[in-house]
Amino acid sequence: MAFSRALLSIVLFCLMLFSGALPASQNATAQPGIINTLPGGETHGHLNQGMYYFEAFSKVSFNQIQQLPDSQWQFHPNSSLFLGTSQSYTWIKIPLQSVPGAPTEWIMTLDWPLVKSIDWYHYRQSTQTLISSGQFNDWQMPPDGPDEFPFAIPLALDSDSTTLLYLRILPSEKALLPITLWPAESFSDHQLQRNWYLGLFYGVLFAMFGYNLSLFIFLRHKAFAAYCFYVATMAGYTLIMNGAGIAWLWSDYPALLEYAYRILVPLGFFAALMFIRQFLQLKHRGLFLNRSSQIAGYLWLTMIILAPVISTSILIPLIDAFGLINCLFAISVSGYLWFKGDRSAKYLTLSWSVLVVSTVILLLGLNDVIPYVIELHYLQNIGVTIEVLLLSMALAERFNRERKMRSEAQDIALQMSTEAAKAKESEMAAQQRLLGIERRVKEELSLKVNEQTRELKVAMQKLQIMNKELERLSLTDPLTGLANRRYFDKRFNEEIQRAKRNQSLIGLLMLDIDHFKQINDSLGHQAGDHVIQSLSALIQRVSGRASDLPARVGGEEFCLLVCNETAGHIASLAESIRTSAEAGVVKYRDEQIRYTISIGAYCVIPTPDTDPAMILKEADDALYQAKHNGRNQVVIKTHKSGEATDSPSASDTTP
């Protein structure tokens, strides 16, 4: 939802630029020959020849606007006019004439509710008589009006003369003004269809809200609470944007409607951000993602608090700009985590995509890039419905996945407990046998005791071997046999503490296979596994020392921790690994696979303030620089702390 709102702002901005670039004959001067003919036999239609508009910075009267020369009117060729965030009055003049055989009773709807007041005057120019007039003030719909939704104007037309419809518009927020014309006999069918659809839409939102709220109450999982908050803000936003809130809920509270858009949009962004933090667990994804999402949340809260006191012309562009930045960041993070294999990020990205597509189609219709039809207003709500359903499915999938992982861990623990119980039962049986043997002859007793003792020792040794094997498997990468990320983090912290005490240098190498995805895509994942196994064997062979710690920490990403060596040795070791990888060949079936690697290394004598995250970041930055510089190279970063070492200087070096 948040991404679609930012995209809406981008498209509106581009369409404003496009409309400003239209030829002067269409955008700058009036065309008095234009007459909108209303067709017969259709359920509804749109302005087929355009309209005229005039922006007045004060409340100009109807008599004054009639005296306005044609040169002062601006011509707009579409059936939808963009009024921007201006708080000034805008006059619109629409020439109308029915075709022979068309109905005489019409309803004109302005399909955008963010308009504070509308004055309308239906005028027959040939006789200089006012046919009808009316006013909508502070979103109040008259009891005898044709519709409870904003805004509907009854018109009486005949085919033998042209009439002029004047509208005086005062928008409350950013405003588009799409206009639809309905024969009176088909308008009731439209109302029934619209109310049925909106009832179904909000029924789905309410059902999803209630279902996930019940899950939160029973499971106490914060992601379900964030989802409910998000759904509630989307419901509030759509109630404002489709006019249902004005028609059904809060038409008697104009002060609320005055600030609805500028509060609900930041609130929607804030709710989306809170859901993303919980759903993608950003606070566990690293310091940058955690802190940046927290700062964004505080900024949205600040906008909500200051909405009543900041001018609309300042606040709404600020919301659009920051919303765009926020959404680009969010979609980048979601796409990156999806690329890294996060299934939750995949669901989030797909649900956004549905809503984005529906919003773009709606905007293209509102600005006549594609033919505008009233049904396009339902399209974004359909996108919201699909998004809500997909996110609910994603939450359920994630919860089931976590529950399955917990169940598997419990099964392993139960299996180990059962084996321990069996060992204990065996021990107790051995003791019982010893008590029976004790009544026998002394020689036989001694023999049986020795036998049972040996059996017990063998059972205990087997149990110890099983426990050690389980521990080894939990700390080892199954594909390469190297240490996994869990064991590497444990050893890494221990070596940093040891280096702090001894004031010795440690070096961290981060290795990444270049263009590994191309190997997988062209030869298959089994070929990629052979390459990963070949590189792991190469690292162990070239490193050589038992004290060095190689580990696989990602798909094609490795680490090598080197302690008690000089920076020069570490640089030489990194280059040896790189050249060996470049010269090597991996044989897989009938293919001979060649590959290269990029290496980033960081050498440091740790100080009391040095932490593992800083060393990992520096090594990762060096790896990024090696990738950026063209791959198949080594970038070494060193840092002098305490006594001087013979490592390179603090600047990056590339062999």
Image: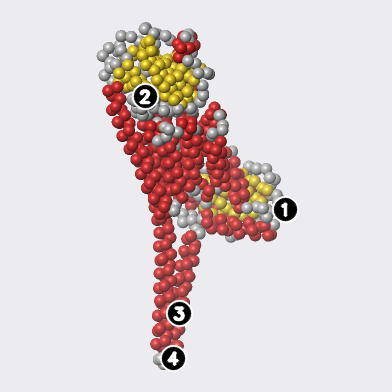
Instruction: Return the residue at label 1.
Output: 642
Label 1 environment density (alpha carbons within 10 Å; few <14, some 14–19, many ≥20): few
Q: Is residue 250 left or right of residue 190?
A: right
Work out whether residue 409 can be spotted. Answer: yes
- Ranked by sequence position, the earlier of labels 4 and 3 is 4
Instruction: Return the residue at label 2.
Output: 152
Q: Amino acid at mark 1?
A: Gly
Secondary element under disc 1, as helix, strand or loop, is loop
**Considering depth in this image, is 403 or 53 the residue closer to the camera?**
53
The answer to which image quadrant residue 194 occupies is: top left
x, y percent for residue 210: 38, 46
Q: Amino acid at mark 3?
A: Arg
Residues under numbered marks 3 and 1 in contact, where contact means CB atoms less than 8 Å apart: no
Residue mark closest to the camera, 4 vs 1: 1
Secondary element under disc 3, as helix, strand or loop, is helix
x, y percent for residue 163: 36, 12
Instruction: Return the residue at label 3.
Output: 454
Residue mark closest to the camera, 3 vs 1: 1
Q: Quadrant of the C terminus?
A: top right
Question: Residue at point 37% right, 42% down?
Answer: 206
Label disc, if present, on residue 443 of the rendered structure? 4
Q: CA distance from mark 4 to mark 3?
A: 17 Å
Q: CA distance from mark 4 to mark 1?
A: 71 Å
Q: Amino acid at mark 2?
A: Ala
- Ranked by sequence position, the earlier of labels 1 and 2 is 2
Work out whether residue 318 can be spotted. Answer: no
